[in-house]
Image (tube, rainbow, N blue to C red):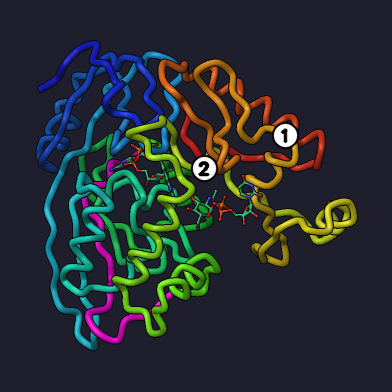
């Protein structure tokens, strides 16, 4: 049922209080197909999942479609593999836990990421050495112009670092309704290369970790440094980690010999945006109810009552400072509306 002038405060983890002009919650694919095919709404659609990668800077003059399509199923794919499918409105972390309860491996490094299954392919979520694309099989989406459903393969999605075709060429064109993953049901692949995972496992004296040990280690690490949105409003990393040329990197390293870095695409060097922001003196800084988180400078926070446009302003000031100091243009990870 369509509702008018609905507050989006309970629907975004930044805790911003703006209104949606029109709002509808869908639990079945058919609900959405019907709304699209009726075609009598003059408003564009905005698809909302858990609102955990979103900064709302104004009342939203769209039809906000809250995707609550549920359902989980699996089929053996043979050779120790299983094809698992979930509705887009399933909570991501609960889905990961369900997979682990069934002894399906592949998603454990992505534990405790907020949001929904349907939004996970949008930015190809990633953490602790694994990206969604590593275990993605296909997805089903509804075309928001025609109401037709379409299947996208891994190749169709054009996944990159915090990117996919749905954040680029097809932005706003489709609503993802179902996602399928190819997981392991035996001989699990253990991804414990990320430094922090290794040290947590060493501390716990876990010599031969299983998928549930990785899951718990990732949860421990995340709880130690990321703010819980139910306590402090935030949307995770505000910017992407930038990739720069070797030449540019050498200039920074000459001044900052300890600059952290990782190999990037095509010979580029990835430098953590959190480090750049901290070097510019922003870590822990507050502007009234908003600020730059004191344990992780890449996260902007709303301590309560903050306005979206003020957070956007703060992010622009931080980005300008990083550009002036290091000559690096930070790109937003968070979707600003
Ligand atoms: P929303 O915020 O609701 O939407 C995000 C975008 O996707 C919007 O543009 C929206 O229109 C679109 N969208 C949502 N659902 C659909 C759909 N079904 N079909 C089409 N478009 C859709 N991200 C990481 O990658 N790695 C992390 O480690 C990580 N850690 C985080 C930690 C915290 C504390 C927080 C708050 C966020 C973190 N994030 C992380 C970001 C966020 O959790 C992910 O991007 C998540 O996938 C967003 O899901 P959502 O359902 O909340 O999406
Ligand atoms: N660092 C600082 N100061 C800070 C924060 C970070 O110096 O305030 C430096 C440290 O050297 C640290 C390095 O940056 O070793 C990396 O920090 P961290 O391990 O916390 O990871 P990140 O690069 O800041 C990325 C993702 C996270 C993901 C983690 C773990 C991006 C934009 N962010 O953060 O994803 O959970 O790695 O894999 O790639 C998100 O996308 O919302 C998100 C939280």
Q: Is residue 76 left or right of residue 293?
A: left
Circle 1: is it few (<14), some (14-19), or many (20+) Cα within 10 Å? some
Q: Quadrant of the C terminus?
A: top left
Task: Say which residue appears at 30% left-offset and 86% top-offset.
Answer: 187
Residue 54 within the magenta-colored segment of the rendering: no
Determine the image quadrant of residue 98: bottom left
User: Image point 88% across, 51% down: which residue?
Assistant: 255
Mark closer to the chain start, 1 or 2: 2
**Left or right: where 100 falls relative to 152:** left
Q: Nearer the viewer, mark 1 or mark 2?
A: 1
* Residue beneath disc 1: 281
Q: Sort mark 2 into few (<14), some (14-19) or many (20+) by Cα contacts within 10 Å.
A: some
Span of residues in magenta = 173-191
x then y, percent, for residue 212 = 29, 71
Left or right: where 311 falls relative to 178:
right
Picture layout, residue 8 above or below residue 323: above
Q: Which numbered dot is residue 137?
A: none
Q: Which mark is residue 237?
A: 2
Q: Secondary structure at mark 2?
A: strand
Q: State which quadrant residue 228 falls in.
A: top left
Q: Residue at x 59, y 23 (%)?
A: 286
């Amino acid at each position: 049922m369509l509702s008018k002038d609905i507050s989006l405060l309970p629907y975004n983890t930044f805790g911003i209080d703006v209104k949606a002009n029109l709002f509808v919650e869908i639990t079945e694919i058919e609900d959405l197909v019907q709304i699209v095919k009726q075609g009598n709404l003059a408003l564009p659609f905005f698809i909302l999942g858990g609102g955990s990668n979103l900064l709302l800077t104004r009342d939203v003059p769209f039809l906000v479609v809250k995707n609550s399509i549920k359902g989980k199923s699996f089929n053996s794919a043979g050779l120790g593999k299983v094809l698992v499918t979930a509705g887009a409105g399933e909570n991501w972390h609960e889905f990961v836990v369900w997979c682990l309860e069934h002894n399906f491996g592949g998603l454990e490094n992505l534990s405790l990421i907020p949001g929904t299954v349907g939004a996970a392919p949008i930015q190809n979520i990633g953490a602790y050495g694994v990206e969604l694309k590593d275990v993605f099989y296909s997805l089903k989406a509804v075309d928001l112009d025609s109401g037709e459903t379409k299947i996208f393969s891994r190749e169709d999605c054009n996944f990159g670092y915090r990117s996919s075709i749905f954040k680029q060429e097809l932005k706003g064109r489709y609503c993802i309704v179902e996602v399928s993953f190819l997981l392991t049901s035996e001989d699990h692949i253990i991804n414990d290369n990320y430094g922090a995972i290794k040290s947590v496992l060493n501390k716990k004296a876990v010599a031969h970790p299983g998928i549930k040990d990785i899951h718990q280690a990732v949860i421990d690490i995340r709880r130690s440094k990321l703010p819980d949105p139910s306590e402090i409003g935030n949307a995770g990393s505000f910017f992407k980690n930038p990739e720069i040329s070797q030449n540019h990197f050498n200039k920074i390293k000459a001044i900052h010999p300890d600059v952290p870095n990782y190999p990037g695409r095509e010979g580029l060097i990835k430098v953590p945006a959190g480090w750049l922001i901290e070097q510019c003196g922003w870590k822990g800084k507050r502007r009234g109810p908003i600020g730059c988180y004191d344990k992780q400078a890449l996260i902007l926070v709303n301590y309560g009552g903050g306005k979206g446009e003020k957070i956007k302003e703060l992010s622009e000031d931080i980005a300008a400072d990083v550009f002036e100091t290091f000559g690096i243009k930070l790109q937003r990870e968070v979707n600003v509306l």
